[in-house]
Amino acid sequence: MSRLDELPVDGVQAGAALVVLALLFLASPLFVRPPNVSLIFLEVGVLLLVYALILVGLNLQFGHTGLVNFGPVAFFAVGGYVAAIATARDPFNAIGLGLSWPVGLVAGVAAAVALGAIIGASTLRLRDDFLAIVTLAVAEIVHGLVLTLRDVTGGSSGLGNVPRPIANMSGGGGTAELFATVVLLGAIALLAYGLVHRLTTAPYGRVLRAIRADEQVTETLGKRVFRYKLVVFIYGAALAGFAGVLYVYHQGAAAPGFFTINVTVLVWVGMLIGGAGNDRGVLGGLVIVLGFQALTRFLNDVIPFITQDQFASIRLMLVGLLLMLIIKYRPEGIWGDADKLGVES
């Protein structure tokens, strides 16, 4: 067993406590504005924690249950856009209902859950490759609808004037808002991780791993495999939708550029590098991937003959190369368990 799994941390209790402390800290006069030099690290931290929420659900689906979901960005986008439409006030060339942000939060997560229930109910009785194809197709359909329904979503221009509750609590934008976002998102991500980790280490988690190993045998033991798979798929969709809502509230807008296929690529690569099925290992893999992205983002300044778009593609290719090396020499991932995943080391 990986040493990461031996660390005695109860994520549920720690996450719940940190959420309360974060809210108290932001509302108190003790809140301080960090130096501007920390801006880049805080930006990466926000993205890391938002993607971590998606990854926790994706690892529950694939790492523990064997559900191949190639479209987590679809639920990420649906949650974000529904929350934006529900709460935006007088957006340019788009629909904004101007409701309060808690209503938008519930609406965004509910929309992601509904989409997950529809996809799960229609595909989870089929082979895993059908689920992979359908989820990938749904992600592209959602992205296409966002660009096509310009009168609703704002099209390529996006949808602005979305409330920013964390910025309001921290007294404005800049490093203060970013630091506040990192504090609160970190607490929420730890809480989500704790809930999933507690679930997967309980008898329920053993059933999920049995389904991943051989669902027909699990069915013969009296377990309702389809119900387990559907609940897990919906739970992952809810986490991705929740992440979308939080990201839109952080940005104060929803735009197609927030919800591209790169989101799916990065969370999948992070999971496979860290070790699918290892709740802490996959988060370590995501840190490696986003850390690499952050360290190389300024190299374009010293390579002037390559355009910014070309350099972005090169960085993504290097991430793919890293994944190829991991799959070849350690297919279970850095912290993964080969026996649990059924791969040969």
Image: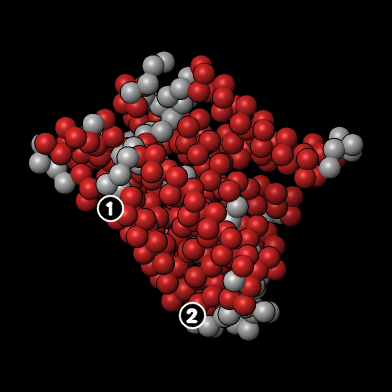
Q: Earlier in the sequence, mark 2 or mark 1?
A: 2
Q: Residue at x 46, y 22 (%)?
A: 331
Q: Amino acid at mark 1?
A: Val
Residue 134's x, y, as percent? 43, 49
Residue 4's x, y, as percent? 40, 30
Labelled disc at residue 231: 1
* Secondary-structure class at tag 1: helix
Labelled disc at residue 106: none
Residue 287's x, y, as percent? 55, 38
Q: How is the image coloured?
A: secondary structure
Is 144 left, or right, of 221 in this rendering?
Answer: right
Residue 195 shows up from this direction: no
- Compute the Cα span from label 2 to label 1: 29 Å
Q: Amino acid at mark 2?
A: Ser
Above or below: residue 284 compared with residue 334:
below
Mark 1 neighbour density, 10 Å: few (under 14) some (14–19) many (20 or more): some
Q: Residue at x 62, y 37 (%)?
A: 291
Q: Residue at x 16, y 46 (%)?
A: 224
Residue designated by label 2? 100
Q: Give the camera-side residue of 319 and 221.
A: 221
Is 159 left, or right, of 4 in this rendering?
Answer: right
Residue 151's x, y, as percent? 62, 77
The N terminus sits in image quarter: top left
Q: How many marks?
A: 2
* Secondary-structure class at tag 2: loop
